[in-house]
Image (spheres, grey):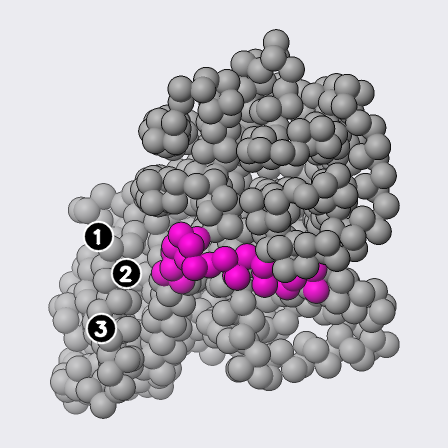
């Protein structure tokens, strides 16, 4: 603060201290600990957790794959707006009916997430450089270049041990942080007693007014430095998956906040007698008693590394959430703890953040410039959180409008004042953080835009059910024994890629299951509710749809054998439940295909425009008399049903088991998109180059199941959008 507004007297120290004290009380305590932490999504925090919470209560997601059955997942726990509160209903309807508001909400969320990633990059650089900078106080021969080199070494070590996870180093983190906070309090009390207890007058906010009156524009510039006292507030919310809300609240109120207040009071007391010269820049290390300097220096560096690690794990959590909700390219995610699902490690992001940190340290040597860069990213995230929490208050909490307006006016007003201060100094090296955040926003927006176009095109080009029925149960080709799992992104309808399979291959499996891996806006989906089955065609076709639903916090660690077993068990449960419902309805068997299958003149138009004539093959070539694996007849006659409902059920279950024994093959439809020739140049550039590059280099969804290559079959398609 005093690099922007030099100390001209004791009143300046009191004014700056008062500003710090009330910033600590207003933002971390009142805003985050008492309000924002309660806006969690079943224990998950962060920008995307808020977005997921809003998406669950209003259909604001731009990807049109929502199903009514999603709301029946037990973890949804919807609080439906009551008719008495017309405000909530009007907001919900307005959000759902306005594409512009949906895009604006997504842009806010992506901007906030980009800022979180930027904070994750600049926090380690800022924390480590500040802590190592204490060497210039303890060893006079140390220069800035040597501080920079030591910081680089610390950062390399920090990111190298990130892969070991939080739980493996947790036993050392807790005691280290406890010692650190106790050290802050102890040093603060020592300085208060030794130097000047009159700094306690700073609790009177009138000194903030005097500070601005004396320094005017300089005091306004000093707000950027004051913002650093609340560094980590957003990480406290984003890292919520590691702790409970109550534990964070109790720890902050009874340990963290008192120790921080005492620490800043002690520094101010020291500056009341030592406010001349350059001592203000290193007030903390200069105020430490000489006998305790090196122990405190050591624990300060340990605390800096822990703070950096906490922000990095928060970045990992945000990226995982954004990936699950279709806003970030898929990356390899390693779960570092079997006990805690939220503890993850993303190798690519880890090393990417290290490179960016080293770039910051080497290009922004001054901690003042680094602090300004940090302030830009931190205040950006805070503002997005304020807006999203306000929307949660209106839409979900349904609390008094006066409280909502008070929250948004007070905190958004404070944050806008801080933002204006840090942006005024953007001409120095801190502009790098804005460029970095803009790049991350650009990546996320392009990925979401391309994924949305691809999904909408697949919906438009899906095959009609009339065509499927015309082809008959044999689909105009040979039905070979086995199960084919055709992966696609459609939540309903027959994907066009299936027509491409039919026109490309001479045979298709006797049972086809369209598998859609879908993420729903909840943290966790219970295993018993994971799979949602539906019959795509009449019973004789043996074609099903399976929507495998995952929450953004779910761990997909099962191998392909486990996945297959769970899928088949869920399918059998579905068929039994379907048989029970049919027996209750007793409306006859309407699943038997009664159309003439003897004609050889049926046509199928492939997505590329080619026309194919499809004959009806003989299924009897592989039919075993001891195992009637197909209910489809190859003649024009329909065999009457000779089994009762129970025998029919057992027959179909036996068919499934035999098909499973014959083998499971994963049919991958790899769909690419290209911009049409008449598209705008910008659209061609984004789709044909940027999105194509991201899609080519991201992790395929099938990689999570570890399927051997011998079980894979892939057919590619290109959609023109």
Q: Residue at x 83, y 28 (%)?
A: 197
Question: Where is 421 relative to 610, above or below?
Answer: above
302 in relation to 423, above or below: above
Coordinates of residue 598 in the picture (x, y in percent): 21, 84
Secondary structure beneath disc 1? strand
**Which of the two discs, 3 and 2, labels the residue nearer the N terminus?**
3
Q: Cα distance, mark 3 to mark 2?
A: 11 Å
Report which residue position mark 3 lands on. 688
Which residue is tagged 2?
A: 694
**Helix, strand or loop status at disc 2:** helix
Q: Which mark is residue 466?
A: none
Neighbour tally class for label 1: few under 14, some 14-19, many 20 plus, Cα within 10 Å: some
Task: Name the one closer to the observer, 254 or 523.
Answer: 254
User: Please, what is the dominant secondary structure of the magenta stretch?
Assistant: helix
| Cα–Cα gap, marks 2 and 1 | 23 Å
The Cα atoms of the two marked residues, 1 and 3, are separated by 27 Å
Q: Earlier in the sequence, mark 2 or mark 1?
A: 2
Residue sitting at 80 percent across and 27 percent down? 196
User: Which stretch is magenta?
Assistant: 413-439
Answer left or right for 632 relative to 73.
left
Q: Residue at x 59, y 66 (%)?
A: 55
Which tag is nearer the camera, tag 1 or tag 3?
3
The location of residue 245, given as percent across then percent down, is 71, 41
Give the image quarter of residue 403. Answer: bottom right
Q: Does the magenta-highlighted stretch encompass residue 57?
A: no
Instruction: Give the residue pinned by disc 1.
Output: 712
Q: Position of residue 691 (x, y in %)?
A: 28, 67
């Amino acid at each position: 603060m005093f690099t922007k507004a030099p100390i001209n007297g004791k009143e300046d120290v009191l004014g700056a201290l008062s500003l710090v004290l009330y910033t600590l009380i207003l933002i971390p305590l009142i805003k985050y600990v008492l309000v924002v932490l309660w806006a969690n999504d079943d224990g998950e925090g962060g920008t995307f957790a808020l977005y997921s919470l809003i998406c669950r209560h209003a259909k604001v997601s731009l990807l049109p794959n929502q199903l009514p059955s999603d709301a029946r997942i037990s973890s949804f726990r919807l609080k439906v707006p009551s008719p008495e509160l017309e405000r909530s209903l009007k907001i919900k309807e307005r959000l759902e009916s306005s594409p512009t508001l949906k895009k604006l909400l997504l842009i806010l969320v992506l901007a906030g997430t980009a800022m979180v990633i930027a904070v994750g990059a600049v926090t380690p650089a800022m924390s480590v450089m500040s802590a190592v900078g204490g060497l210039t106080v303890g060893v006079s021969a140390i220069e800035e270049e040597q501080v920079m080199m030591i910081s680089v070494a610390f950062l390399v070590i920090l990111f190298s041990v990130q892969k070991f996870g939080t739980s493996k180093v947790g036993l050392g983190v807790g005691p280290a942080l406890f010692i650190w906070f106790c050290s802050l309090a102890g040093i603060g009390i020592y300085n208060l007693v030794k130097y000047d207890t009159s700094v306690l007058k700073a609790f009177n906010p009138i000194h903030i007014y005097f500070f601005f009156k004396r320094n005017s524009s300089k005091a306004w510039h000093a707000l950027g430095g004051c913002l650093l006292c609340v560094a980590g507030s957003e990480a406290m919310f984003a890292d919520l998956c590691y702790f409970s809300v109550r534990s964070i609240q109790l720890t902050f109120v009874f340990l963290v906040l008192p120790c921080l207040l005492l620490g800043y009071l002690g520094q101010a007391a020291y500056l009341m007698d030592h406010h001349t010269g350059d001592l203000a820049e290193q007030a903390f290390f200069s105020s430490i008693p000489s006998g305790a300097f090196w122990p405190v220096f050591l624990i300060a560096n340990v605390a800096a590394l822990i703070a950096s690690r906490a922000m990095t794990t928060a970045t990992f959590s945000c990226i995982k959430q954004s990936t699950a909700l279709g806003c970030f390219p898929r990356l390899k995610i390693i779960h570092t703890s079997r006990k805690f699902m939220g503890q993850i490690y993303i190798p690519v992001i880890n090393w990417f953040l290290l490179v960016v940190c080293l770039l910051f340290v080497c290009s922004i040597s001054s901690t003042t410039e680094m602090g300004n860069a940090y302030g830009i990213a931190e205040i950006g995230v805070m503002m997005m959180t304020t807006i999203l929490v306000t929307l949660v208050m209106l839409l979900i909490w349904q609390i008094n409008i006066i409280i909502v307006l008070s929250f948004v006016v007070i905190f958004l007003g404070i944050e806008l004042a801080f933002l204006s201060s840090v942006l005024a100094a953007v001409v120095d090296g801190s502009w790098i953080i804005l460029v970095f955040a803009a790049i991350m926003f650009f990546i996320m927006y392009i990925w979401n835009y391309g994924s949305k176009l691809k999904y909408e095109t697949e919906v438009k080009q899906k095959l009609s059910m009339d065509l499927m029925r015309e082809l008959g149960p044999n689909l105009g080709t040979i039905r070979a024994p086995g199960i084919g799992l055709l992966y696609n992104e459609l939540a309903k309808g027959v994907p066009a890629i299936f027509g491409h399979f039919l026109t490309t291959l001479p045979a298709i499996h006797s049972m086809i299951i369209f598998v859609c891996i879908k993420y729903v806006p909840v943290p966790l989906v219970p295993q018993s509710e994971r799979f949602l089955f539906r019959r795509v065609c009449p019973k004789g076709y043996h074609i099903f749809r399976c929507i495998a639903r995952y929450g953004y916090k779910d761990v997909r660690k099962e191998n392909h054998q486990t996945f297959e077993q769970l899928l088949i068990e869920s399918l059998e449960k579905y068929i039994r439940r379907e048989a029970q419902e049919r027996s209750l309805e007793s409306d006859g068997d309407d699943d038997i295909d009664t159309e003439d299958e003897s004609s050889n003149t049926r046509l199928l138009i492939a997505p590329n425009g080619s026309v194919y004539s499809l004959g009806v093959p003989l299924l009897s070539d592989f039919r075993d008399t001891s195992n009637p694996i197909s209910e489809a007849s190859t003649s024009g006659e329909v065999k009457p049903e000779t089994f009762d409902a129970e025998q029919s059920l057992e027959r179909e279950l036996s068919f499934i088991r035999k098909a499973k024994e014959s083998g499971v093959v994963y049919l991958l439809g790899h769909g690419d998109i290209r911009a049409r020739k008449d598209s705008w140049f910008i659209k061609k550039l984004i789709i044909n180059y940027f999105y194509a590059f991201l899609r080519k280099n991201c992790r395929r969804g099938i990689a999570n199941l570890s399927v051997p290559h011998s079980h894979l079959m892939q057919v590619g398609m290109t959609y023109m959008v």
